[in-house]
Structures are given as C-alpha cells and as structure tokens.
Amino acid sequence: MEHVRLGVIGAGNMGGAHARYLLNGEINGAVLTAVLDSSVERAEALKKEIDSSVQVFTDEDSFFESGLIDAVLIAAPHYYHSPLAIKAFGHGLHVLCEKPAGVYTKQVREMNEAAERSGKIFSMMYNQRTNPLYQKLRNLIHTGELGEIRRVNWLITNWYRSQSYYDSGGWRATWEGEGGGVLINQCPHQLDLWQWMTGMMPKRMRAFCYFGKHREIEVEDDVTAFAEYDNGATAVFITTTGEAPGTNRLEIAGSRGKVVVEDGKLDFWRLRVSEPEFNREYKGGFGAPECWKVEVPIEGKETAHRGITQNFVDAILKGTPLIAPGIEGIKGLELSNAMHLSTWLDDWVEFPVDEELYLKHLQEKAAQSNVKKDKNSVVLDVGGTY
C-alpha cells in the first residue's frame, strides 16, 4: 500500500476540521476519498466546499461498501463511536476514533474485542499525548525520577462554555444525545492523560457531579472527584464549564519530590534524599529534605490532531508504534463513568466499575429526559479547542 485512503465519518465541527487538513495534503501518505454524514444538509454543504474527487455519502452501508476507503476517521456523536468502529472492523478497515471511545464501558469493551479480532490498526484521537510537556512528565514518573506517586491534584476549569454553545447542537448536553457533559465532552483528554502519565487506575472513587448548575442543560457541568489507589495514593479531579477565568493546574507529589504543570511549564521540586529515607534517618525534630526547584526543559512541538492522524497512517504503512492505541480508550472513560455512577448512587464506586449497573442508570437518565432540541447543528470553529 503506497497511501491510505481515508474516509471521514461526520461532517460537523471536528469531522470538517479533519477533512480540511487531509484535503490540504498535511498528512503524508494519506488521501481523503470519502465523507459520510447522516445529515443531507451538512453533507451537501461540505460537498460544495471540498474537492470534487471526494465522494460524499449520506447512506452508511453505501459508504462502507464503496471500496473507496482503507481506513475511517470517526467524528460522529459519542454514542455512535463504538458501533461505527465495530462496523468498520467488520469491513476490514483500520479505525481512528475521536474522543471519547464511547459513552459507557460496555460498548467500548465490545469495540476493543472487535478490533482485536480484526487485526486492523486502531487508534484514539488522544492528541494531548503528543504534547512534549506531558510526555516529559510521563517519563519522569515511569523512570522513577519522581518516586512513588502519593498524590495527584488536577484543577481544570478553563473550559468556559456559554449557553449558546450548548444550544448549537441538538445532541449537545443531553443524556440521550451526548451521554454526559464536561466529563464526556471536554475532559476525555485529561482523564486519559491522568492514567496514561501515572500508569495507575484507582481502586475506588467518590465523586460529586452537579447537573445543570451553571447552564440550562441536563448533564454535569461541575465536578469534584476523589480517588484512592492500592498503594495509598490519592487524587482529586475538579472541573467545570461555568467558571471564568479558568485554571489548568496539575500537581503530582511523589516520594522524591513534586511536579507542577501550569501555564505551559513543568516545574520539578526535586528532593536530594527521598522522603522515606529522610524520615528514617533524620533525628532533628523540625526539618525537611533539601529540595531543588528545577524548571524542566521541554523540547519538541505539540502536533495535536495532525500528529495523531499522521501516526495512525504511519502505523498502517510502516508499522510505526501507536501513540494512542485504541484499546486504551476505555481507561479514561471508566474514570468518567465512575464519577457519574458515584454521584447517582451517592456512594463510593469500586474499580473495575460495574458496567451493567452504569448502563442501567444511564438508560434511565436518557428515558427521563425532557429536553427537546432542534436536531440541526450549528457548525462552530473548533480551531482553538483540544
């Protein structure tokens, strides 16, 4: 195979953005050959904009059976990610899926099983894994430089979204259409990074989600979660879309120091002697280990969506290892599922999360929804988003 013929599923905000950089020839070894969207209006609008050599479909079966594609990039509403990926694998196609992997872990587990059976390349659009800052932090953790993790705090509130944003799409901010709010829409990258950088999943979690606290929506727009790990470490994750100005500050404390990520910098407070060793040997009462503050140099450039797409194409053509293997998408989703379920049960939730119990509660929320919105969507500029 000299090049990968890509079909984009979804002609909305993200799908349109992916289609444009593919058409501009920004991905080596890839060519956009087809686009699928269930909306005739969106499909026609995109057809007028894009190259005439790209075929636009509104019928799913015709798209998959066209013979025009080797791989798909899925940018449809969340509930469709897993079913579309499963169908693509069934047609022998490689899959790159936008975040999140799905809405509930049961459907994502089925998608992962289909991927493994197919033997095809499967990647998630976790573009924040291309950020050299987070790559460096992951390296500090996995090489033992930070020591054993003891505490993780992530305050990420710079997701400000106005009511007009939520009103721009009929599927937005509904249990039936989106399957959640800030956790399923804005935070999948951070939830993925949380477990990817630390290499840890919690043993249990207690969360407090507030639904429609700041906006006229039925899903969560304000969340505080507390997690515990097998090694005794704890974590706090706080997020909202209703706060301005917002903050994005990640702090991780280990037995050999502390790191803080904020304002595009990675600061490392490095202990000359690990805290456990100092504690064993120090006899002076008041005192603390000697600490050096180091501003860690960050080299390289974040390649974002294009970087993940290029990596996906290179994996197909050259066997390049994936930056974001698709089967890992279930981990960040399980964190958000746990936060919802803990709130609904008003109790701790153990890991692994009870998939059937979560799905039961999610289906009840969707069935009880009173939200009636126009199903037509306004196409927004997503150039400055994750």
Image (cartoon, rainbow, N blue to C red):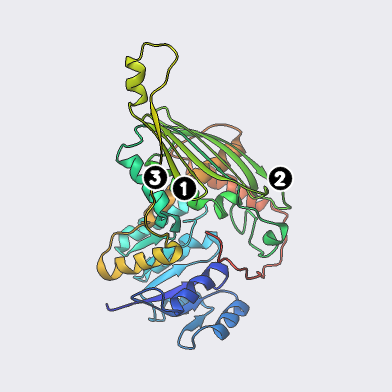
In the rendered view, would you say 53 is above or below 275?
A: below
Where in the figure is residue 331, as x and y percent of width and height?
A: 43, 47
How far apart are labels 2 and 3 at the CA level?
38 Å
Mark 1 crowdedness (10 Å alpha carbons): few <14, some 14-19, many ≥20:
few
Q: Amino acid at mark 2?
A: Lys
Position above or below: 272 against 165: above
**Mark 3 or 1 closer to N-term?**
1
Q: Position of residue 222 (x, y in %)?
A: 64, 44
Q: Residue at x 39, y 73 (%)?
A: 27
Q: Which residue is mark 1?
A: 265
Which is nearer the eye, 176 or 131? 131
Q: Residue 314, how many percent across, how many down?
A: 31, 68
In the rendered structure, the answer to whether residue 350 lies left or right of residue 319 reads right
Find residue 307 and report its image quarter.
bottom left
- Identify the residue under disc 2: 213
Of residue 214 and residue 376, the one placed in the foreground of this image is: 214
Q: Is residue 86 visible?
A: no
Image quadrant containing the N terminus: bottom left
Residue at 45% in and 79% down: 24
Q: Amino acid at mark 1?
A: Lys
- Image position, residue 153 (x, y; %): 51, 37
In the rendered view, tell whether residue 280 sits above or below residue 300.
above
Alpha carbon distance from label 1 to label 2: 32 Å
Residue lying at 46% horizontally and 54% vertically, measured from the top left = 107
CA gap between label 3 and label 1 equals 8 Å
Q: Nearer the viewer, residue 278 or 357?
A: 278
Q: Residues within 10 Å of mark 2 (few under 14, many from 20)?
A: some
Q: Secondary structure at mark 3?
A: loop
Q: Dots 3 and 1: beta carbons under 8 Å? A: no
- Disc number for residue 296: 3
Res. 190 visible in picture: yes
Identify which residue is drawn at 32% across, 15% down.
281
